[in-house]
Amino acid sequence: MLDLDKLQKQAVADCLEHVKEHLEGEFHVEPIPEPPEESLSWDSSLQRYVYDVGLELWWRCGQFEVVLDAQDQVVGYVDHDKWLECRWEPLTDEEALRIARSSGLLRQGLRKLESRQGEKGCLELLVEVLAGKQVERVEVRINPARKAVISILPVPAGAS
């Protein structure tokens, strides 16, 4: 009979090799456990056994933090990978607000209070967001070179 452990290790190695040819990054492959009788079958047209293994591919994306409020609702995030290639480039208010809205976390009812160049050349926006009947302040950091949101963080009440 065939050595299924050896076949599984070869499948994992082949998968990693294929992924690294087409994508960049750090990957981890794990086989999905199956009983041997479900992974090995006879193919009558090929006149040989065929080994079928499911694999889970993990791709390290980077560090991403999610900020929750007291009710476990998402109110912000920090995407650390968006700091890459960050450098100052001027953006109009309309461009900056469009980029902030592209996060999906902020609604259409944004009002810019102030903007300034922040650390590493990012654009820091202080905006007001209509949340129900309340107005909340949010700090948005944007990487102007990539036109990407780095972070959205609520500003505590009373802070300016």
Image (spheres, helix red, strand yellow):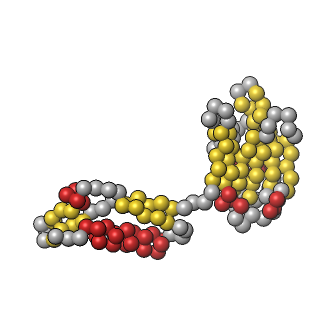
Residue 8 left/right relative to 48: right
Q: Is residue 1 above or below residue 68?
A: below
- Measured as percent of width and height from the top left, residue 94 is found at 77, 48
Residue 145 left/right relative to 7: right
In the depicted view, which residue is nearer to us: 40 or 125?
40
Q: Is residue 116 above or below residue 120?
A: above
Q: Looking at the rendering, in which quadrant would you find the C terminus? A: top right
Residue 128 visible in the snapshot: no
Residue 123 left/right relative to 146: right
Among the 4 quarters of the image, the one containing residue 147: bottom right
Residue 47 visible in the snapshot: yes
Residue at x 75%, y 40% (from the top left corner): 154
- Measured as percent of width and height from the top left, residue 136 is found at 77, 34
Q: Looking at the rendering, in which quadrant would you find the N terminus? A: bottom left
Among the 4 quarters of the image, the one containing residue 36: bottom left
Counting every numbered tag in the picture gives: 0
Among the 4 quarters of the image, the one containing residue 76: top right
Residue at x 54%, y 61% (from the top left corner): 60
Residue at x 76%, y 52% (from the top left corner): 141
Residue at x 85%, y 34% (from the top left corner): 158
- Measured as percent of width and height from the top left, residue 23 is found at 51, 69
- Measured as percent of width and height from the top left, residue 95 is found at 75, 51
Q: Is residue 6 above or below residue 76?
A: below
